Image: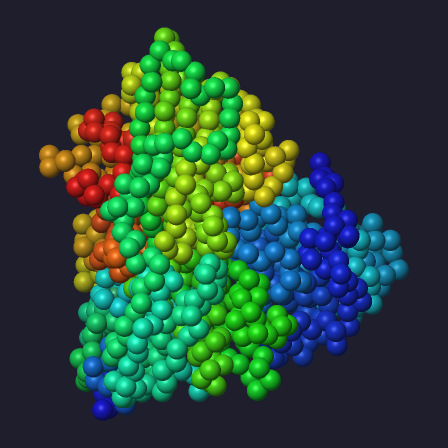
Amino acid sequence: MAVKFLLNNQEVDLDVDPAMPLLWAIRDIAGLTGTKYACGKALCGSCTVHLDGQPVRSCVLPVSAAAGKTVTTIEGLSEDGSHPVQVAWRELNVAQCGYCQSGQIMSAAALLERVPNPSDDDIDGAMSGNICRCGTYTRIREAIHRIAEDQS
Amino acid sequence: MSELRKISRREFMKRTGQAGGGLVFALTFATACTPADEVADPVARKLASVAPNVYVNIRNDGIVEIYCHRSEMGQGIRTSLPQVIGDELEADWDKIKLIQAIGHEKYGDQNTDGSTSIRKHFDLLRNAGATARDMMIAAAAATWGVPAEECVARDHAVHHEASGRSAGYGDLVDAASGMPQPESAEFKSPADYKYIGKPMDTIDGMAFTTGAAKYATDMVLPDMLYGTIERCPALGGSIASLDDAAARAIAGVVDVIRLPEPSSPPVFNVLGGVAVLATNTWAAERGRAALEIEWDLGANAAYSSDTYKEQLIASASAPGRVTLNRGDADAAAASVHEAIYYAPHLSQAPMEPPAAMARVDEDGNCEVWACSQDPQTARATVAGTLGLEPEQVTVNVTLLGGGFGRKSKPDFIAEAAWLAREAGRPVKVQWTREDDIRQGYLHSVSAQYFRAGQDENGATTTWLHRTSFPSIVTTFAPGVPGPQANELSLGAFDSPWDVPNLRIEACDAPAHVRIGWLRSVCNVFHAYGAGCFVDELAHVKGRDPKEHLLEMIGPARQINPADDGADYGNYGQDLAQHPVDTGRLAAVAEKVADMAGWGRELPDGHGLGIAVHRSFLAYVGAVAEVSVDANGMLKVEEIWTCIDAGLVVNPDRVRSQMEGAAIFGMSLALHGEITASGGAIVEGNFDTYPMCRMSEVPHKIHAHIMESDALPGGVGEPGVPPIAPAIVNAYFAASGNRVRELPLRNAGLV
Ligand code: FES
Ligand code: FES
């Protein structure tokens, strides 16, 4: 079955099983590998993308749920890595192995869109679904605060 | 003052494993090109270049290619390695192009394990840069007809100050192509370092933040198949019956293939099972779910953590093999204190589960792309699995989405290679999180018994430590009954206590799962047991834990466990160069206590705990501040750490390793537990094997690096061991309750 949606501002028309999780449709069918698999059960946030601007776990969302909607992945967050979250992440050298960071960045970008100056509780609420096995949490928190300060 | 430590060319070749093959001295364009499979840039390959050694290739467009022969898994080696080579080479940071090396013995040791990348390769890397620099100088001097001594290298160019002439490295490629490589090279004075010791930004920062970073799981080849494998729930079992009709009927499923039965001992060989190959991951997973398999669970079908725990504690409670003895640990004492500590199996659970892509060509040669910590072992394992010569196997190393020891074991790479050959198409094998947690190489479950005797003045005079855990060596050899010397060398033999009577005993424990390395390995439980027990003694004696800890460490001295009969490994390095130095251990204890404001007045319900540990030739102190609320729930409020790792190459990456190690240590202290029931692992994903999340980690994790010009020690692992005991000790300080089992969540504290 064909599922149509806007992926990073490009129309895509994917011939897939509608039950296929959006994650695999993005990675295996559309060929964008920045969105990562790490649990497949909405437990870790590595696969976070924006669906009509809202952060969702693409590993448990059937691709059919994206039909007619807008999906943004890490590759589409900015053209050149210049989104404030991406910049702050580099300034603070947040990433260690980097594997969880697509999901962390997508969650942080959605948080800052919703709450431009988040409190620590806001950060806990928005970011606790994203696991980082390397343990970059303190730098992620610092980076989010820094972006809020820079923009206020 | 110039540092005149030199490596002879012979030594250099020996270390790079080239003594037999011989180094190519005069490299012209035709021979200077490195294997095309290491470089995906055909434009660059058409440029003339000169390769002074296997780690450096200087192109005539001025770009210096540096071959990173170590695997990047978050520790930052892809940044710190070119820092070392580039510094000695006087290269411009912006003109360095980093190329990830394939697995090949020409690079010497590539096993990215044991926190070795800097501590064992610092001189090698400096020499690679320094000899390349001297080759550029020699080329310029010959071109200008001046003595080399009158020329200096600076800013990616050679300068002859007297005549005011300069030539960029790219312009010297032609001249250098006819030059012999310098026999040896003088290293820079540390005072002149431009990159070493500086917090250079992560080289992969842009890739990490834009989704461009490529891990094994991201590999794509034309005509590839996506593979997933159902393996026996218990180690060593086999298939009793298989019905794959339903699986084959799933749209997108292309093939169902049985893998060879697992070997005994398991080593790094494939684990058997049934693979489903499909045109996408989703189809493969659905096909796998539709397989009907009956397993014969085999010899480990009775493995259950409940009964095994009793067995392990009984083993540690009885005398074991004496592996180190000083004086008489049974000598009479005025008072005796004893305790048993237990810690469960753990899974490394790197964020990227194991994944590998493989392709086999018409001639049977195999090429793989894998998140491997150890590409040479991967090469040998793939060759063994397919019956090939190692020369017929190429191992490309991708970025690793975390490793923590799991990706030292190439079983998943062998699976991909075997399936690619059977299927006649490229195959990517993707482990699920459940596969990773249930089918991995687990960190050992352990029980440890401690007994200490005190004299009338409260001084500890005897120390007995019995340690019992299934050995990693069981993964490689049959009939290994219990802990081996190489494991006791990890935080047991180098016990720093200043006691006249000390004995360490190894107590038997059979293995029923594959046992493997996990970040800092046996140091995790040895530091936890000893670090908590020494804290218990402080409280028994009514002493301040930090003062008591320093007293137990005693005066600054060097310990040689061999003096007490131990077969001590010292992380593969010379004790003369890297002694067990109690002075450095005491110094990190003092420093970290200062950082944390040890002794200050604390809010109600708060407590501070301290622990120190030496591992991988580095010394780490940790203090945790915890709070206990009205419901008895524990929260880690803040963590301070201090590391003395000798000279450090990139302080920011060292700090990030310490921050990450603190959280890794917190995860295992609070949550980490893998259990077995009926031979199978119970936990499967992050719901049942939780790890720390943003909301429960401290907002502040402090990491101090001691200034030191001592030889570099390890960095990736040493931060982990002192964390769990610091937290447990802090919990005691806050609550008066001593917990002797990990994880703390089993005591209802989190
Ligand atoms: S992979 Fe989707 S939440 Fe973990
Ligand atoms: S940076 Fe490695 S898992 Fe987050």
Q: Position of residue B511 (x, y in %)?
A: 39, 50
Q: Position of residue B566 (x, y in %)?
A: 55, 33
* Residue found at the very far left of the displayed protein: B630
Query: What residue do we see at 41% from left, 37% from top?
Result: B507
Measured along the vertical axis of the image, is residue B502 above or below residue B67?
above
Along the viewing direction, whichever of A30 and B134 lies nearer the viewer: A30
B264 in relation to B624, above or below: below
- The location of residue B421, given as percent across then percent down, is 49, 81
The quadrant in which residue B666 appears is: top left
Q: Nearer the viewer, residue B457 or B326?
A: B326
The quadrant where ligand 1 appears is bottom left
Q: Position of residue B312 (x, y in %)?
A: 33, 41
In the image, taking residue B626 as reference, residue B66 lies left or right, namely right
Is residue B619 positioned above or below B25 on the image?
A: above
Name the residue at 32% across, 21% down. Answer: B337
Q: Nearer the viewer, residue B506 or B241?
A: B241
Place residue A100 in its image quadrant. bottom left
* Residue A45 in view in this figure: yes
Q: Quadrant of the N terminus of chain B?
A: top right
Residue at the (74%, 40%) spot, across then down:
B4
Q: Is residue B410 left or right of residue B209?
A: right
Q: Is residue B76 above or below residue A86?
A: above
Residue sitting at x 17%, y 80%: A65
Image quarter in which the C terminus of chain B is found: top left
